[in-house]
Image (spheres, coloured by chain):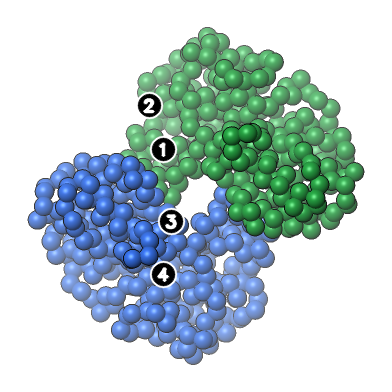
Chain colours: A blue, B green
Amino acid sequence: MPRYRMTVEYDGTPYVGWQRQDNGPSVQGAIEGAILSLTAETVSIRGAGRTDSGVHAMGQVMHADLTKEWKPYTLRNALNAHLRQASERVAILDIAEVDARFDARFSAIRRHYLYRIITRRAPLALEAGRAWWVAKDMDHEVMHAAAQTLVGRHDFTTFRSVHCQANSPVRTLDRLDVTRHGELIEIRATAQSFLHNQIRSFAGTLKLAGEGKWTPDDVRAALEARDRKACGPVAPPDGLYFMQVDYRDDGAPAMPLPDDESDDS
Amino acid sequence: MPRYRMTVEYDGTPYVGWQRQDNGPSVQGAIEGAILSLTAETVSIRGAGRTDSGVHAMGQVMHADLTKEWKPYTLRNALNAHLRQASERVAILDIAEVDARFDARFSAIRRHYLYRIITRRAPLALEAGRAWWVAKDMDHEVMHAAAQTLVGRHDFTTFRSVHCQANSPVRTLDRLDVTRHGELIEIRATAQSFLHNQIRSFAGTLKLAGEGKWTPDDVRAALEARDRKACGPVAPPDGLYFMQVDYRDDGAPAMPLPDDESDDS
């Protein structure tokens, strides 16, 4: 049974999140529905990250096992046609056939997220739902300095949702960079895996630093408190984008790794 | 009665266009509704361009006469609060009090539009409704060369909707540049005023050049034909953005000018 790795883009706004749930449409459900329409097969797909409701993706990765052998090009076009017909806000960017040991979630060695903040007095019209609107300007250099106190291997209990299901709150944050392009402030985060709400907890806390309410030392102290109550407000999902997943090499299999849980966003 | 100039951003998707119409919600209606909620005054506003349904704006300009004297800052925030409350996809970016001779439409000396095309195999998910999706790649350099045949003062009958209400098909096109950023092809157009569907007619015709179906000489021949039937297919509204309007100087009055009609997009 051939296994296919697919790279997926979606607008998270109309979905309850990546994962199938009883309370509304999910991205997973949209793709499984397209596969069912195309192949008459009921499959269960797995994504590299379980993004929350309202969180977007430009490069989510998933895998699916299909009975039939497909040309990746044909499969992608056919699934996209079914997704469009169902008016889903989901597109399959790329498909490759991979080794059966490849697992979109457990083979991932690095996940990349982007968090977008637009700082301006006027509310967002074109970017509504696509960025976090912050009416007052912020100092992105202070935000970047504060972010550097979080990089490395830490117990991130402070920045983890109380609903996080990961066994351990310890993660290694490879990168947390804050840059600015006019009104747009971008936070780019990279790690093997993230805890639930970790990046949105970072974004909400870094906003306090950008507004001058917290110093970078306050952010470090919040981390060291290992206490969820020490966290700043959690930023809304609107600004979060799952950008990219790295694997050992293109499509190569990998064994589960220590940081194998990914309750992202 | 003080006159206010307002710069407006909107997502054109849910609207029948800028102008009030019987068949659905308009951007003009949304703003007039916000003014009514705030001031209990029924005003009629005028925009620099009457964008069509689905066409977006980052810098539409309009003017309104209000009975009361407002601090521009207070007026902007109050109108935005009303627009948000009504779930409109419209935001007032900036307000200034201007001379009573200022007219958003007739005082404009230059209008700037952007047309966005995304060329990739996969349909658009995040950018659906925000760009024209073209599945096959195009040569943007050929598009740019073809565009240069259109710059200048011409009879643009070929590139004008049959519904265009302007008296004359003659316009002076100051700029029509085609650039590329990865999958994104941007067409930037500047003129004192445009004919109805002129930029979407340009975009659809330049696509033929980008695909290699037409040469730049074919585009010039289409212009010279002065025949609507010589035009390429009209591009969808999704990719069109009204970016900016220039006035003689900041808020200065101006008299009506020869090219005073603007049946844009």
Query: Residue B226, relative to residue A24: is it above or below?
Result: above
Tag on residue A80? none
x and y percentages locating residue A46 in the rendered image: 25, 63
Q: What residue is drawn where x is 80% and y is 52%?
A: B39
x and y percentages locating residue B189 in the rendered image: 59, 31
- For the question of whether residue B102 can be seen, the reply is yes
CA gap, disc 3 and disc 4: 17 Å
Q: Amino acid at mark 1?
A: Trp
Circle 2 packing at 10 Å, graded few (<14), some (14-19), many (20+), is some
CA gap, disc 2 and disc 3: 35 Å
Q: Amino acid at mark 3?
A: Pro
Q: Amino acid at mark 2?
A: Glu
Residue B176 appears in which quarter of the rendering? top right
- For the question of whether residue A182 can be seen, the reply is no
Disc 4 marks which residue?
Answer: A265
Task: Please tell me which residue lies in front, B7 or A142.
Answer: B7
* Label 2: element kind: loop
In the rendered structure, the residue with mark 1 lies on which chain?
B
Disc 2 marks which residue?
Answer: B211
Q: Are marks 2 and 3 in contact (CB under 8 Å)?
A: no
Disc 3 marks which residue?
Answer: A14
Q: What residue is drawn where x is 35% and y is 73%?
A: A263
Q: Which residue appears farthest toward the right when viewing the image?
A: B1
Q: Quadrant of the N terminus of chain A?
A: bottom left
Q: Judge if badges 3 and 4 mark residues of a common chain.
A: yes
Circle 1 packing at 10 Å, graded few (<14), some (14-19), many (20+), is many
In the rendered structure, the residue with mark 3 lies on which chain?
A
Disc 1 marks which residue?
Answer: B133
In the rendered structure, the residue with mark 2 lies on which chain?
B
Q: Judge if badges 3 and 1 mark residues of a common chain.
A: no
x and y percentages locating residue A124 in the rendered image: 60, 55
Sequence-earlier tag: 3 or 4? 3
